[in-house]
Image (cartoon, grey):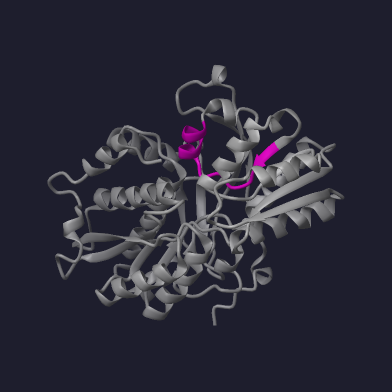
């Protein structure tokens, strides 16, 4: 959660010369950005850190091509219809650059709207369709899709635990959850794993005890959690309170990063496996630079929501500089095939589907006694790049 102390640190960015909310649209020649993320509802904590990430990078750049940078926060509430309406309103005021869309449903809807309006949208959402069957010229994706997340978590865990033959899944019932579940089922079939059950839940669900009771009755070797953010935290917390860590291995396929570990605490995370798009201790040159910048500016370690928004916005800014133009069509051409030093090492935007090719990480929570500092919640167990080949994604730019 974004606590008062962190909010005050963010507010402190609005010093003389820094970006403030009142700067938005104040100057007609400014290059205008928008951060469309859930600032209210179950995923508000992720949205608030994402908003912080965009603000931080725009402040760091200050000006691009001699023009000021401005931005506005759009509270999508995690609802596709709300997200689309707010994007439409903002594009009518001249904004063409968008980085956000934490949930797959809202990201898919916003990407289509931004494409229709002649802008650029980059997201950290996970549904394969974003750079697959629903791809378009405007939409780019920094995060690894659901296929890669499962390939880099379920597969290496099976390699470590070849006797873990019975798996149970808990899945949010929307496009992101189904993507993770289908990818997991494909590996189960390939490896001869018995999928002993699945529980679907809605995006509004907060009480998971019934699903966990079903899972315990199935006696799995591994409990695979396919939900995200506060929902995966609530599920994991309840699972640990039921003593499930004593009887099975727990894997959270898509963790929301450091903020999730801080909310849960070391005792709950100890021994649990987590899939992660980003971890602040990644040994990559630009990540070290970024980490130091966030440490000195905000006095915190960067988490996934902040980092993802920062790098997404930075990619657009660097493409504007590379193109020497803020015309979206020219910037899109500069982004396609772009290779750069990113948070996970060398990252590359694949021209065919606008997918960033980057690593995904498998973490393991460590006991409190072995933490080197207050943020050292986990070790990186393995990492790698797993992406469908361009001809398998079903992306047709048209």
Is residue 284 shown to the viewer in this render? no
Q: Position of residue 63 (x, y in %)?
A: 21, 57
Task: Relative to 141, say whether 233 is above or below.
Answer: above
Residue depicted at x 55% and y 41%: 233
| Residue 28 located left or right of residue 202 | left
Outermost residue, top side: 369
Magenta residues? 250-264
| Residue 259 located left or right of residue 18 | right
Q: Position of residue 319 (x, y in %)?
A: 37, 63
Residue depicted at x 33% and y 53%: 54
Task: Relative to 159, say whether 79 is above or below.
Answer: below
Residue depicted at x 67% and y 32%: 242
| Residue 126 located left or right of residue 244 | left
Which quadrant of the view contains residue 329? bottom left
Position of the C terminus, as image quadrant, is bottom right
Task: Relative to 235, say whether 30 is above or below.
Answer: below
| Residue 89 located left or right of residue 163 | left
Q: Position of residue 393 (x, y in %)?
A: 65, 69
Q: Position of residue 156 (x, y in %)?
A: 72, 42
């Amino acid at each position: 959660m974004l606590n008062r102390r962190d909010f005050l640190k963010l507010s402190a960015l609005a010093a003389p010369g820094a970006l403030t909310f009142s700067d938005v649209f104040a100057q007609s020649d400014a290059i205008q950005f928008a951060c469309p993320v859930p600032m209210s509802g179950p995923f508000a904590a992720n949205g608030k850190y994402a908003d912080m990430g965009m603000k931080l990078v725009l402040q760091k750049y200050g000006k691009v091509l001699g023009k000021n940078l401005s931005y506005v926060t759009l509270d999508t509430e995690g609802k596709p219809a709300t997200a689309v309406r707010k994007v439409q309103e903002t594009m009518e005021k001249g904004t063409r650059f968008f980085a956000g869309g934490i949930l797959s449903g809202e990201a898919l809807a916003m990407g289509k709207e931004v494409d229709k309006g002649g802008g650029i949208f980059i997201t950290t959402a996970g549904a394969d369709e974003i750079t697959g069957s629903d791809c378009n010229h405007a939409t780019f994706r920094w995060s690894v899709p659901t296929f890669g997340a499962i390939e880099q978590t379920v597969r290496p865990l099976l390699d470590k635990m070849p006797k873990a033959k019975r798996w149970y899944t808990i899945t949010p019932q929307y496009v992101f959850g189904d993507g993770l579940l289908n990818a997991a089922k494909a590996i189960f079939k390939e490896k001869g794993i018995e999928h002993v059950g699945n529980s679907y839940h809605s995006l509004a669900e907060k009480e998971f005890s019934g699903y966990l009771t079903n899972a315990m009755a199935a006696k799995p070797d591994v409990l695979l959690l396919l939900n995200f953010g506060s929902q995966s935290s609530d599920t994991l917390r309840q699972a640990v309170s039921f003593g499930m860590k004593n009887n099975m291995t727990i894997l959270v396929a898509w963790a929301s990063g450091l903020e999730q570990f801080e909310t849960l605490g070391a005792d709950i995370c100890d021994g649990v496996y987590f899939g992660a798009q980003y971890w602040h201790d990644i040994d990559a040159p630009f990540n070290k630079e970024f980490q130091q910048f966030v440490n000195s500016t905000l006095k915190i370690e960067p988490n996934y929501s902040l980092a993802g928004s920062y790098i997404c916005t930075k990619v657009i800014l660097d493409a504007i500089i590379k193109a020497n133009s803020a015309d979206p069509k020219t910037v899109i051409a500069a982004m396609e095939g772009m290779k750069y030093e990113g948070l996970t090492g060398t990252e590359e935007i694949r021209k065919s589907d606008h997918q960033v090719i980057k690593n995904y990480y498998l973490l393991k929570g460590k006991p409190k006694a072995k933490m080197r500092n207050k943020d050292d919640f986990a070790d990186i167990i393995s990492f790698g790049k797993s992406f469908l080949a361009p001809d398998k994604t079903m992306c047709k730019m048209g």
